[in-house]
Image (tube, rainbow, N blue to C red):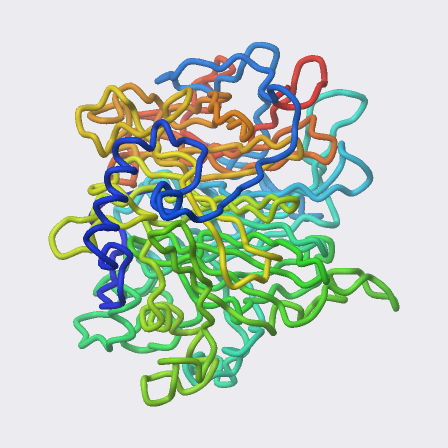
């Protein structure tokens, strides 16, 4: 979610050191490099580091010659999906389609009159992060995807004229995760396989187990769960990772919008996590666990990375607390040379942090009657969590969030490791992690140990008493965002790194220097989704908000889009544009590289984030309009993209 407005969370008021406070000279050097010569230093490392004589290197993906074989397309304001000549785009599994649970496949009703029970077995709303899990080849598998949030004006027949228990249940059923079976037979189009033994919905009322140091902790216990080991539901799930052992990792992002804290007084912990007086969604009035005046610990039970085994529909999903509580965008996995898992994650909130978790144990093989997912059921419950510090000389450090280390002591409000991970923000404040411009998706190059991360925007940077610019976040009122990259100095479990910016997004035609960027190729703003393919192409997806799209500094950029970056040359080329007011998100290739799945989220989004039920298609009628129909309600949908000749995507 790349929305950057006053409703966006901005709760970091810590006094931990920032890069910009290191020294005035370094800061001046950085600003000169970032806002002036960076366009010429596009694919080099920090000019501050180079000036200091540091030896730095970053190996991009190996390759010979150009890897972008398609003609870039123009920016667009049209209400449709556009792809390059020679490609085709197929709409698949829009919101409201039955997922295929045997014996329970209600049809979608275009007037919004489906019940909560219907929605619980239908595709959720606002498709987001997604991965493909092959079953018997590249043309048959499972698609697992997140449903981030809902537009109540579209979800209900009369929108939010009134709240009711039924509307709350339907809203809760529209969140979470969908698991569906898809196939492509005899060279034909993709289709959902229904019914399917794998079909499953995980919603805001599905039981989740707790694993790791916060399981059973006093801060996780509630009246309904006095043991603190089982949580009902997951929601605001954004990006997703796919583990080497075959599971799916989903990040719980802006969970604070669902809770109401009343008139307080709020604790310092609740303030640090942005608890509101009232909820953006009307759940607390009809589901009391979201009323934090009655059940204060329920708030602590969200904001985790959840792990799902899509191949076992009977399995209980687990919230992995060892990886820390945060407004998690998602989680992405690397593997050390000795076989341990390293999970990177970012926190999509202004001035929050980038983390990595290194597992204690090695990834186990399948055996003894267990699948590999089952053999690694507790792998992510034990290990070390770190927060990133990006220094002005182009180096960085990973700081351990371990109880008893430095300031993380009982005397400072961290009674044990469970409290450290529940208060991961406060622990990162105390250690001096770098406050970032809303870290979103990541992509990992296993060959070079290079990690890329989108910092989507932060219009509050340097405004009022907010932190000013620093090396990693070099622009005041950062509306456009940037992509940062780092390379571990050693294996993925290294403590030290070297970093630089891959690109500052923007449009050189803008008047404001902070919005010009240094894009080599097709312009864009608000980078969000990322995927690195096997050929060394970095795919970039964008999410400018409907309130700013195609106006002001975004007037030349068009609708949200997907671009491809050749890491060998630095060229960025536009591959896809989406319909009006949508986000382009979710990015997954089939193993043969010949089908690309992406998600179109919230087409026709209202600038207020809630549609008028009397005019549901005021801004968009997609996807129905793309095929000559008239849509009663715009619907988030998955899009399957292929070359007409069946070749590799991007060539």
| Residue 187 to residue 616: above or below | above
Q: Residue at x 44, y 79 (%)?
A: 220
Residue situated in front as seen by the camera: 396 or 586? 396
Q: Residue at x 40, y 49 (%)?
A: 394
Q: Residue at x 25, y 59 (%)?
A: 22
Quadrant for the C terminus, please. top right
Q: Residue 64: x percent and y percent?
A: 66, 23
| Residue 508 to residue 291: above or below | above
| Residue 192 to residue 296: above or below | above
| Residue 57 to residue 14: above or below | above
Residue situated in front as seen by the camera: 332 or 173? 332
Is 3 on the left-hand or right-hand side of 252? left
Quadrant for the N terminus, please. top left
Residue situated in front as seen by the camera: 145 or 357? 357
Residue situated in front as seen by the camera: 323 or 490? 490
Q: Residue 494: x percent and y percent?
A: 56, 61
The answer to whether residue 547 of the structure is visible from this angle is yes
Tell me where residue 527 sits by quadrant: top left
Q: Residue furthest right?
A: 368
Q: Residue 364: x percent and y percent?
A: 77, 65
Q: Residue furthest top?
A: 85
Q: Residue furthest front?
A: 53
């Amino acid at each position: 979610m790349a929305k950057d407005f006053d409703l966006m969370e901005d709760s970091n008021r810590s006094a931990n050191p920032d890069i910009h406070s290191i020294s005035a000279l370094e800061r001046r050097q950085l600003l000169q490099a970032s806002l002036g010569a960076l366009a010429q230093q596009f694919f080099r490392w920090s000019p501050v580091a180079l000036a200091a004589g540091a030896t730095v290197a970053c190996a991009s993906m190996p390759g010979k010659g150009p890897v972008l074989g398609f003609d870039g397309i123009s920016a667009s304001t049209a209400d449709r999906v556009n792809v390059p000549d020679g490609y085709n785009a197929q709409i698949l599994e829009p919101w409201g389609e039955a997922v295929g649970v045997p014996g329970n496949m209600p049809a979608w009703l275009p007037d919004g009159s489906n019940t909560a029970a219907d929605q619980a077995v239908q595709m959720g709303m606002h498709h987001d992060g997604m991965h493909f899990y092959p079953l018997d080849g590249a043309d048959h598998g499972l698609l697992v995807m997140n449903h981030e949030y809902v537009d109540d004006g579209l979800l209900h027949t009369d929108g939010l004229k009134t709240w009711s228990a039924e509307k709350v249940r339907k809203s809760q059923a529209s969140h979470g995760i969908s698991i569906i079976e898809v196939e492509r037979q005899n060279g034909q189009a993709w289709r959902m396989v229904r019914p399917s033994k794998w079909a499953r919905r995980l919603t805001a009322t599905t039981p989740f187990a707790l694993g790791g140091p916060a399981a059973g902790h006093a801060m996780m216990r509630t009246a309904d769960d006095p043991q603190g080991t089982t949580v009902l539901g997951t929601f605001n799930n954004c990006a997703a990772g796919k583990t080497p052992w075959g599971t799916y990792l989903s990040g719980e992002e802006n969970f604070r919008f669902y809770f109401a804290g009343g008139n307080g007084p709020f604790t310092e912990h609740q303030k640090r996590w942005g608890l509101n007086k009232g909820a953006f969604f009307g759940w607390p009035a009809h589901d009391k666990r979201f009323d934090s005046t009655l059940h204060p610990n329920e708030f602590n039970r969200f904001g985790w990375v959840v792990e799902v085994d899509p191949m076992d529909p009977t399995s209980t999903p687990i919230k992995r607390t060892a990886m820390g509580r945060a407004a998690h965008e998602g989680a992405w996995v690397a593997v050390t040379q000795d076989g341990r898992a390293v999970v990177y994650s970012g926190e999509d909130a202004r001035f929050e942090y980038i983390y990595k978790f290194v597992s204690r144990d090695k990834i186990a093989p399948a055996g003894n009657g267990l699948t590999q997912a089952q053999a690694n059921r507790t792998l992510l419950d034990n290990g070390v969590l770190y927060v990133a510090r990006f220094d002005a000389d182009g180096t960085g450090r990973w700081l351990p969030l371990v109880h008893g280390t430095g300031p993380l002591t009982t005397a400072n409000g961290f009674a044990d490791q469970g409290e450290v991970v529940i208060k991961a923000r406060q622990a990162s404040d105390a250690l001096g992690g770098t406050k970032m411009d809303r870290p979103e998706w990541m992509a990992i190059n296993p060959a070079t140990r290079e990690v890329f991360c989108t910092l989507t925007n932060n219009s509050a940077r340097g405004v009022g008493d907010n932190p000013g610019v620093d090396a990693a976040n070099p622009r005041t009122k950062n509306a456009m965002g940037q992509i940062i990259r780092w390379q571990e100095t050693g294996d993925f479990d290294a403590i030290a790194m070297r970093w630089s910016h891959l690109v500052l997004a923007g449009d050189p035609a803008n008047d404001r220097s902070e919005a010009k960027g240094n894009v080599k190729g097709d312009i864009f703003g608000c980078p969000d989704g990322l995927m690195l393919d096997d050929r060394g192409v970095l795919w970039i997806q964008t999410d400018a908000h409907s309130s700013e799209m195609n106006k002001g500094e975004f007037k030349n950029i068009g609708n949200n889009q997907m671009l491809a970056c050749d890491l060998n040359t630095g060229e960025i080329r536009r591959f896809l544009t989406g319909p009006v007011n949508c986000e382009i998100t979710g990015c997954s290739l089939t193993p043969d590289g010949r089908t690309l799945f992406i998600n179109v989220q919230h087409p026709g989004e209202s600038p207020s984030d809630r549609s008028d039920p009397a005019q549901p298609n005021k801004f968009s009628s997609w996807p129905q309009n793309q095929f000559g129909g008239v849509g009663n309600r715009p619907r988030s949908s998955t899009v399957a993209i292929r070359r007409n000749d069946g070749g590799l995507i991007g060539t």
